[in-house]
Amino acid sequence: MKAELQSRLRQLPAVDRVLVELRKLTDHPWPQDVLTGEIQQAIAELRRALLADQLVELPDCAALARQVVAQLHQLRTASLKKVLNVSGVLLHTNLGRAPLAAEALDQIQQVAAGYSNLELNLETGRRGSRHRHVEDLLCRLSGSEAALVVNNNAGAILLALSALGRGREAIVSRGELVEIGGSFRIPEVMETGGVMLREVGSSNRTHLDDYRRAIGPQTALLLKVHTSNYRIIGFTRSVSAAELVPLAREHELPVIEDLGSGLLRALPNADLPLEPTIAETVAAGVDLVTCSGDKLLGGPQAGLIFGRRQWIEKLRTHPLARALRIDKLSLAALEATLGLYVRGEELSIPLLAFLASSKIDLEARCRHMQSQLVEQGLQVELIEDYARVGGGAMPEAQISGPALRLSHPQLSAEHLAQALRQAETPVIGRIQEDFLLLNLRSLPVDDDPLLVQTLRASLARALSSYRSVK
């Protein structure tokens, strides 16, 4: 058996012979080292399969060359691509959360296409701060004395805790020790920042006296975390930021509040619950307020920090601030997005436009699409559905409106969903009771024709595959 294996290993295709066949199949000027590396990797996979007794027949040089060409094609195709979100989840974390406004995209293009004054003061000709491009806008919109931006909200919390509490205690309610996506947990962030956790209250009830009794010589700050991705209901009690601030002032301690979703103004939809805005939280006297840029604000990924100048300066000069700093493209998109708020043009932001979409408009879009999709046995029904905000924001909120329900006598909902995911422009819907649901609230209206085109092509491809198997 060993001799037979050795014989088969010697029959593995030679790199130079596969390379000759490969050159016949592609005229793209691939670098020699890339071609050689792909061939060597393919041969290594064959060797592993032989050693594991998982390969019945060895491919010849031409067959292996065709396999390598397919692998090279993947290298020419971007892995990160546009998808059509018809899941009805507006801030879908797996799909990149908030889509950007056209103005933000234009600003990214301007800044990315060449050089920019990212950290150059054009008046003095000397080095400036990248934060100045957005700090005034953030202060105008929030009423805060100063502001700072880092790469995401987790970074904002880490920076605040490290700068103000390292080596000492932060007091936080047990009911606010949240875990959000990716196993990001407040206690672990505190540990990473070198801050000792001091829990007060219980999981469902915390009182102001709990904080008062916990304050001691080692206390550095009081921390509040907005429970944006879950709700505790029933026999509950929590302490608001407005209640905490006077207590903190008595002991000359800062209050930090993580608002999570980052709401600048009331959302344009009556179905949604009230959510504290950044300005309201700043007005309550909270010393530092952190939030995300790519959630309810509708901008790029960023961690926004608002607050009193004395604390913001401590964060700005901390060594972590450089490691967590926002990049120029996100900064460009954020400046453009904030500009829309300042000018009262925030409905140009896709997320807010989605929320503001009326049932009448959505139904008209659905009916128009329905008339275009009834073909090849596809059954398309108009139903009442609920969209969700997503992204760890407003977990109980449901936004009613119409949706399309698709089914096919030969294809399951999973087959339809898979075919759509594998399209040139993938489509992400929602499966419910063996139906595929398409909720247009999370789709820009300009993408409706592309959705119809993709559905038709994907259905034809799925049916062809089904019939060939049959």
Image (tube, grey):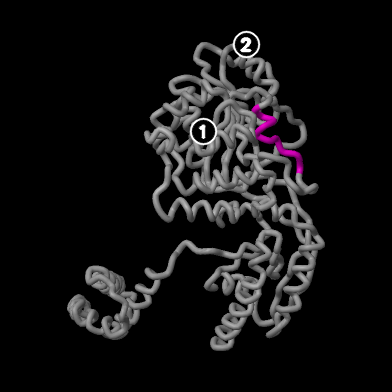
Q: Position of residue 392 (x, y in %)?
A: 62, 45
Above/below status of 452 relative to 399: below
Q: Residue at x 65, y 50 (%)?
A: 390
**Farthest residue in the right direction?**
360
* Marks 1,2: beta carbons within 8 A: no
Taking depth in this image into account, of 43 and 157 the one nearest to the observer is 157
Q: Position of residue 254 (x, y in %)?
A: 57, 20
| Image quadrant containing the C terminus | bottom right
| Amino acid, disc 1 | Leu
Q: Which type of secondary structure does the marked residue at label 1 adopt?
A: strand
Taking depth in this image into account, of 152 and 49 the one nearest to the observer is 152
Residue 46 within the segment the image draws in magenta:
no
Q: Residue at x 50, y 64 (%)?
A: 81
Is residue 99 visible in the rendered structure shown here?
no
Segment tinted magenta in the rendering: 273-282
Residue 276 within the segment the image draws in magenta:
yes
Residue wearing tag 2:
250
Residue wearing tag 1:
148
